[in-house]
Amino acid sequence: MKKTVKNLLIKFLSLAFLVGFQAFATEEAENLGEEKKFNAAEMIKHHISDAYDWHFFGEGHQSVSIPLPVILYSSTKGLQLFSSANFHHGTESYNGYKLEHNHILSEDKNEKIYDISITKNVASMMIASFIILFIFLSISSSYKKNIGKAPKGMQSVFEPLITFVRDEIAEPNIGPRYAKYLPFLLTAFFFIWVNNLLGLMPSGANTSGNIAFTMTLAVITLLVTVFSGNKEYWAHIFWTPGVPLPLRIIMLPVELIGIVTKPFALMIRLFANITAGHIIILSILSFIFIFKSFAVAGVSIPFAVVMMLMEVFVAALQAYIFTLLSALFIGQAVAEHEHHDDNH
């Protein structure tokens, strides 16, 4: 069974890589055919950045992409809703708005706009949410139908992962009250993992490589930690027990800063690791079009395949690390400390 799953996974990843590389190569070949100088930095930035359409391959009017809805709230016009296809790849304006460097700007300098559009990253998060809902609703249905029976199908695949998060992450780090926070930890783990895997698909969105995405997850962890903190947690922060009075005064600002730096580390770690992986793979493939050599291609492609396999591992690893550290921070907030306040 394990061997079959392993073979299917390898075949799936190989197919995904080949399809992605073919689309990548087709697009760059078209650019070279139009006598455009290949710009690796511009290409990498284009692939890892968010966008108002879901681009697959091609350039200009020959590109294949899915336009996404643009939703703006204007201080003068109110709610504005239209398709991103109206921008014609950023070359024209529409209804008083223009697209510049992946940002929508108003041609009226006195107009303030609030952009709540469904971009590529937002669409990818929606897809990930539907996937997770489908998986867990199916698993829940299987548990209800197969009471007292051995798990099978999708239930048998995801049950070890769920018990792993419960037994190896939540309970050891949070303690007896872990069940209260288990839904959040499971959601964070699978949401990050699925988004990371979707980002490795051909033309996938670099969702976890978006600082707003990781910042939002980190802020949620911060809020859960802060509002879960008990009296002893806040006492350790504002008046650290067991240390002399002068040190308590010094430790107070350090502990307050630590409340913010912990989720900040969560945000940067996830963002940097996922973005770095995408940049490395695209950089290796860029050598083919920079040197225009079959010899370079023979070296670059195997290296890119190896990096792709490593990124599959990193996708799960970063989800695990984020969930583990979140559980650790929550555990510190809800732990019952035993201490003695020694006055010297």
Image (cartoon, helix red, strand yellow):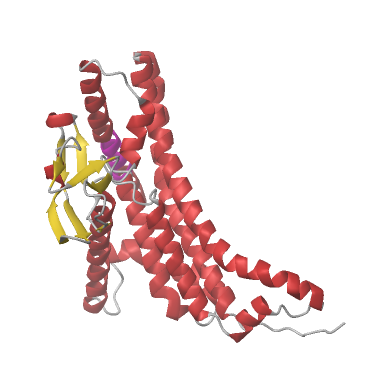
- 29 in relation to 255, above or below: above
Residue placed most toward the observer, 202 or 6: 202
Q: Nearer the viewer, residue 103 or 340?
A: 103
In percent of width and height, residue 167 lies at 48, 71
Q: Quadrant of residue 262?
A: bottom right
User: Which image quarter is the C terminus in?
Assistant: bottom right
Residue at horizontal 28%, vertical 43%?
A: 102
Residue reaching furthest to the right: 344
Task: Give residue 326's position: percent from left, percent from top.
Answer: 50, 66
Q: Which residues are magenta?
A: 8-17
Q: Nearer the viewer, residue 299 or 116?
A: 116
Q: Magenta span: helix, strand or loop, mainly? A: helix
Residue at screen point 38% across, 50% down: 210
Looking at the image, is 38 positioned above or below residue 68?
above
In the rendered structure, the answer to whether residue 337 lies left or right of residue 166 reads: right
Above or below, 155 against 200 in this view is below
Any magenta on residue 22?
no
From the viewer's side, name the closer residue of 85 and 146. Answer: 85
Identify the residue shown where x is 27% and y is 55%. Answer: 122
Regarding residue 310, the answer to whether it shows in the image is no
x, y (%) of residue 213? 37, 56
Q: Is residue 245 left or right of residue 163?
A: right
Q: Position of residue 312 (x, y in %)?
A: 39, 46
Relative vertical location of residue 121 with respect to residue 20 in this rendering, above or below: below
